[in-house]
């Protein structure tokens, strides 16, 4: 029974190039009962991951080790994957103008706010 529950866990793609923040995000996602894909420091590795399995939703930093995350965000949006932007490089307002359905928070984001956004993204995820 536990193994069936594990396979039914929503998968969250985490793209974040700052090691400590990536670790913290991943731990928060796991603590909430989700499976983490990543974390990835660059969008090219994340593209490889989504080619193999599309996540239920994603948490993306705007600036990754290999540039802006927008091509990945576009691919995820086209696939109907809810996105949470977690960034210090763009304001939530700027991100929501470009991605009206996305959730966005500025770094540092209080854990309670991030957890609330994760819950909202899960509700939007299509299974």
Image (cartoon, grey):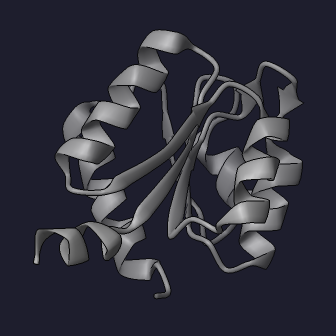
**Residue pictured at 80% horizontal, 76% vertical:** 78
Residue 64 picture quarter? top right
Question: Image height check: is 66 above or below 6?
Answer: above
Q: Residue at x 79, y 62 (%)?
A: 51
User: For the N terminus, which image quadrant?
Assistant: bottom left
Q: Residue at x 63, y 34 (%)?
A: 61
What is the x, y in percent for residue 24? 34, 24
36 w.r.t. 111: above or below:
below
The answer to whether residue 33 is left or right of residue 91 is: left
Q: Is residue 80 left or right of residue 83?
A: right
In the rendered view, would you say 119 is above or below 64? below
Q: How many marks?
A: 0
In the rendered view, does 81 fall on the left or right side of 111?
right
Nearest to the observer: residue 123 or residue 109: 123
Q: Residue at x 48, y 24 (%)?
A: 22
Query: From this viewpoint, is residue 98 visible?
Result: no
Residue 103 spot, x, y in % from top left: 51, 58
Asked if residue 68 shows in the view, the reply is yes
Q: Position of residue 63 (x, y in %)?
A: 75, 26
Give the x, y percent position of residue 106: 50, 32
User: Quarter of the image holding residue 35?
Assistant: bottom left
């Amino acid at each position: 029974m536990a193994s069936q529950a594990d396979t039914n866990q929503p998968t969250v793609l985490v793209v974040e190039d700052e090691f400590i923040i990536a670790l913290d995000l991943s731990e928060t996602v796991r603590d909430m009962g989700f499976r983490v894909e990543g974390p990835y420091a660059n969008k090219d590795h994340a593209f490889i991951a989504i080619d193999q399995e599309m996540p239920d939703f994603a948490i993306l930093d705007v600036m990754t080790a290999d540039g802006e995350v927008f091509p990945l965000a576009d691919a995820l949006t086209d696939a109907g994957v809810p996105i949470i932007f977690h960034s210090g490089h763009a304001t939530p307002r700027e991100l929501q103008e470009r991605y009206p359905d996305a959730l966005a928070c500025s770094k540092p984001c209080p854990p309670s706010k991030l957890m609330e956004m994760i819950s909202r993204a899960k509700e939007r995820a299509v299974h």
